[in-house]
Image (cartoon, grey):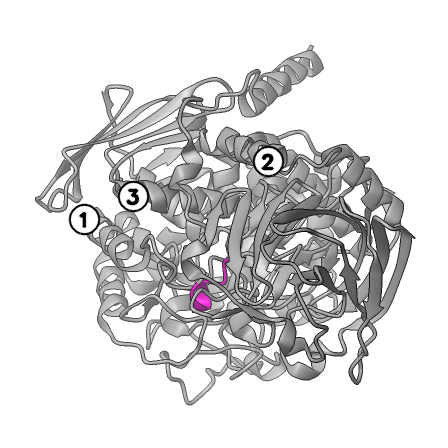
Amino acid sequence: MKKLYLSILSLMLTLQITGCKSNQGNRSIDYTQYVNPFIGNADNGHTFPGATTPFGMVQASPVTGAVGWRYCSEYVYGDSLIWGFTQTHLNGTGCMDLGDILVMPVNGKRLKSLEDFRSGFDKKSERATPGYYSVELNKPDTKAELTATTHAAMHRYTFHSPDSASLLIDLQHGPSWNEKQYHSHVSLCETKWEDEYTLSGHVRNSVWVDQDYFFVMKFDHPVIDTLNLKKLEGEVGKRIIATFKLNKDEQLLMKVALSTTNVEGARKNLMKEIIDWNFDKVKRDAKDTWNSYLGRIDVTGTNDEKINFYTSFYHALIQPNQISDVDGMYRNAADSIVKAETGKFYSTFSLWDTYRAAHPFYTIVVPEKVDEFVSSMVEQGEVQGFLPIWALWGKENYCMVANHGVSVVAEAYRKGFRGFDAERAFNIIKRTQTESHKLKSNWEDYMKYGYLPSDKTPAESVSSTLESVYDDYAAADMAKRMGKKKDAEYFGKRADFYKNLFDTQTGFMRPRNSDGSWKSPFNPSMVGHSESVGGDYTEGNAWQYTWHVQHDIPGLIKLFGGNDKFITKLDSLFTLELKTEQADVTGLIGQYAHGNEPSHHVAYLYTMAGKPERTQELIREIFDKFYKPKPDGLSGNDDCGQMSAWYMLSAMGFYPVDPVSGNYIFGAPQMPKIVINLQNGKKFTIIAKGISKENKYVKSITLNGEKYDKNYITHEDIIGGGNLTFQMTSKK
């Protein structure tokens, strides 16, 4: 009988989470009109304007540069030259990779140097909307258009005055840290002209991860001539000039599909997703797909507010990326070709960033994806021995500290998701948190000292400890819910290790040596970064990391000596000026850095310490200063949608300070009305009565007409549907 009850309960939870019908909002609204893919394209936003689909493998987009940190997405809005168009891109990251298969139209005489292929362009002609990009190129006098499906891109080139219409196909290209790497990162390049319309191939390269990609490229006109350009020193990748016979204003169509498995995998992807040569249909289908997702939230606000919101929504859904083929096959972390257990395998998990708000956002708005995300992480974890830290193309790049795949899995379990094997998931969590592996974990020292000692840890000792402590808490929570008492107790004790780094004399989380002494000298404003300046903090300092106790804010307040002292310290954080040239520490209000993730929950701590009006002030200030509908409108890297998820959840009036808890701490809504069209068929409506520039404070809250006195709302309350109403006021 107990088993039957549990089965029925599990079924009810599944129906509640995944929904028995899709709820997509008003189908008559074109939500894509409010998306501006150029937002974040300037300098350190590192977003791209090109064509992609939700969670797609392919992102076809222009390239304006490829060497150095500035070009992590290969595009900077203010540049004047386009190098070509590549088929894959990272969204808002701080590292170099992807940028596969550069294609550039060529017209006229044969060119000798790479620089000669690059072209100026008419900036006013540039257009970008979800699933589509176009631009007029000056040198080849050609209009370039791009669209995409999950695994394939489609290009359309209109040669206005063709002399010798050609395409450069550059298989050496890829974003790189320096010129030497740009010419040496490819280790294998095999191509085959299958016929006069079809080129296929396999490229292996290594920048951030070891990447194998296979492709099939087809043209709607026959190739009448080919030429391989001379390789430069260190190069393995081919640069092919393919020439076509075209008349004035005639269009050349190209479609290219990718796969991690083999050429046949790429061919299956292409045959499934782009059957014919109807560019406009592919473009229209991409737009429709985007609308089906964007329509899950309806917002009421100014045009700028809608643009900021829906562009954030768009950026949040660019990844994780489905890298398995249409038949479910993919190349795993051990370079074996396997089938995804759910039929889909996802990668591009920037987990140090996205566990904070992006993944909680997914649990509300795209719940049907959550089990697939978790299963993908578990599959990769079982192969490599630990959950992904930062997963790309099915491989591990070991970027950032701790392992917040633990948090994402535990959060999903806490919220009732049961479409993954919980026992397997917890087993890999346990391995992740107890078995040391290269580069990013030392559990022996962690357990011996109760922290990672500064004198025994190459860099980031404080950040690594505090971030790992949160994962311990997550592991303990999942263990407890699964009835694993011993595991819950073990990880629960480790979740208190943060206390070992708190210096009561200075009021900071500070580096500590193996003999128990505090590292000295100590400057709480000194910014650390493992790959550049070193130090004990990750892209931050003591001012920013002292608050990184997301799971136990009451415990942190107690260490400070109560709410008043805690608030006084918080006040100093937001008023004491920080001067730094560290590129990742941006969006400053005092020492608070909104451009980097460790600060993202901090404004909400005022609410938890009994001063919600200060949280409400700060949320409005962050909105006004750091989110604007223009290319330089982001204060830092979008970081695979984390910056965007912060914006959307905060616009709703709440934020997951502790994602695993399932609770969202109240701030203040930033728009008059937001309706979440939940996938269980219900609606959750947030109303801000009387909101204005002056009325930024919350006077009272009601949930479904009843007075609501808690400082948070639960995940269950949200997905249960209903009305959350804030009465706004100008008075603190």
Q: Amino acid at mark 1?
A: Glu
Is label 1 or label 2 in front?
2
Residue picked out by circle 2:
280
Q: Position of residue 279 (x, y in %)?
A: 63, 38
Determine the image quadrant of residue 701. top left
Tell me: 342 left or right of 688. Answer: right
> Is 728 rendered above or below residue 407?
above
Q: Is label 1 in contact with label 2 (beta carbons under 8 Å)?
A: no
Q: Position of residue 309 (x, y in %)?
A: 37, 43
Q: Position of residue 382 (x, y in %)?
A: 79, 49
Q: Which residues are magenta?
A: 42-47
> Which label was assigned to residue 305?
3
> Is 308 rendered above or below residue 67?
above
Of mark 3 and mark 2, the one earlier in the sequence is: 2
- In this view, the residue in front, 56 or 608, is 56
Q: Secondary structure at mark 2?
A: helix
Q: Residues within 10 Å of mark 2 (few under 14, many from 20)?
A: few
Q: Is residue 212 magenta?
A: no
- In this view, the residue in front, 544 or 686, is 686
> Which label was assigned to residue 613?
1
Determine the CA span between mark 3 and mark 1: 22 Å
- In this view, the residue in front, 136 or 263, is 136
Identity of the residue drawn at 45% across and 62% down? 45
